[in-house]
Amino acid sequence: MVISVPRLVIAAPSSGSGKTTVATGLMAAFASRGLAVSPHKVGPDYIDPGYHALATGRVGRNLDAYLCGTELIAPLFAHGARGCDLAVVEGVMGLYDGAAGEGELASTAQVAKLLRAPVVLVVDASSQSRSVAALVHGFASWDPEVRVSGVILNKVGSSRHEEMLRKALDESGVPVLGCLRRAAQVDTPARHLGLVPVAERRSDAVDAVGAMAEQVRRGCDLDALYALARGAGELSGAAWDAAEVVASSPPPPLPVPSLGAAAPRPPHRPERPRPQTPDGLRVVAVAGGAAFTFSYAEHAELLTAAGAEVVTFDPLRDEQLPDGTHGLVIGGGFPEVYAPELSANEPLRKAVAELAFGGAPVAAECAGLLYLSRDIDGQPMCGVLDVSARMSERLTLGYRDAVAVSDSALAVAGTRMRGHEFHRTVVEPGAGAAPAWGVRAPERRVEGFVQQGVHASYLHTHWASQPGVARRFVERCRTS
């Protein structure tokens, strides 16, 4: 199979240069021309893809060479870009910044090379003139395999400023494909973990994306950018397919229920049967809504391929789990922001506790871990885990190399996976009698909890790297 989707990688010398504004604006501007635009984000970021989805009407997808491995970048890209006229890939941090201490691994530059895609460099020009040429020359010449094929100047102050910048860049050999003036209306609000997700400000986010598109239409040469995208090199290989990878993953041995410490059980209630759905499917409820916005699209696709019916629910609004729920996935998000509202929804907290104490498989990452705790800063949560969570001034951030310590609904002990931590909260204790993961770096430690069918941890993982995780989880749904 030959992959020939026109594509661009939008990169920058550093974070804060305007990549998200430019990439999202380009996606929306091209989509408004009637093109089917495939949106992608380098790295583990969950928030930017939400804006990309708003701009294109398609699911925003991540390309993370650390979490998934370099060999999956092109197949995952092809899966997301199938049937599209153009793909726009937003980079992460600076062009050459990747996993700490791992060289180019997981950098925008590495992904651009793996995709054989031209790079457009977004430069914050607000405090420079002729020096911009030296900066662009350095980035363009650092790695000959990275094709820095154009520049978009951002935060340009005036017509005179633009003239000086363009004249300087004439000497660099890298064409200027856009020039954007300072525009406060395209700013998006941020807080302790970055931009505020689309789900929390949808109306304002729609307006912001519209402003980004208009700014890009006014300031960028869209025809030249599309022509550049069409010059991307062909890729060979098959697109990633959830059904194929699940079918080829090893049969999942069932986990032995953990005998680790458990939170006190809630008062006894008669067990309610969990009815089987048609064709042998099992309902896997996935937390969504404003408090739980972090998820990779491939997780739901893998669960579906493994035989689950994936149903989304909102813990801020729904007082019961979806009918027939056999398993529960609670990903990342901002439960600390919505702690009072989550706490006030006592019927759902009790329903989650009943499901978990009944032995059903529950996969909880970061925000999910907090939701299963006794409390967040004193606000009662589900009480599935005998831990307390609190906000912290310290940001915990970085990739992690991990190995499963305990057999669980997700993995057999000894399974190696790579993950990512990103939080400003602390749970005490940090690990249970049966920990979820042993983390190898930056320091050796155990973390997380395996308790009956529950697997809860701060670690975000990408199941495309281990599709047997989804198969094992759904099989546990059938037998619990």
Image: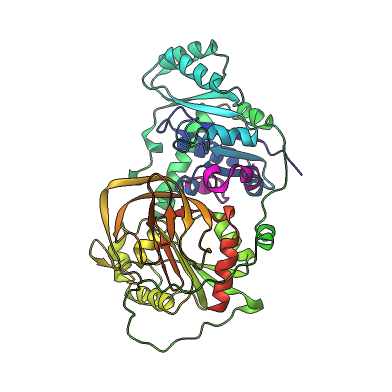
Vertical relation: 19 (above or below) 205? above
Residue 238: x, y in percent? 72, 47
Magenta-colored segment: predominant secondary structure? helix
Residue 148: x, y in percent? 57, 24
User: Hey, which residue is sitting farthest bottom in the picture?
Assistant: 270
Query: Could you tell me which residue is drawn at 39 percent across and 49 percent down?
Result: 444
Residue 421: x, y in percent? 40, 49
Vertical relation: 461 (above or below) 406? above
Vertical relation: 65 (above or below) 351? above
Query: Observer-nearest residue: 383 or 379?
Result: 383
The segment highlighted magenta reads 51-77
Which quarter of the figure has residue 35? Answer: top right
Q: Is residue 150 visible?
A: yes
Query: Observer-nearest residue: 81 or 429?
Result: 429
Query: Could you tell me which residue is drawn at 65 percent across and 45 percent down?
Result: 81
Assess whether residue 34 is covered by the magenta stretch: no
User: Hey, which residue is sitting farthest right in the picture?
Assistant: 1
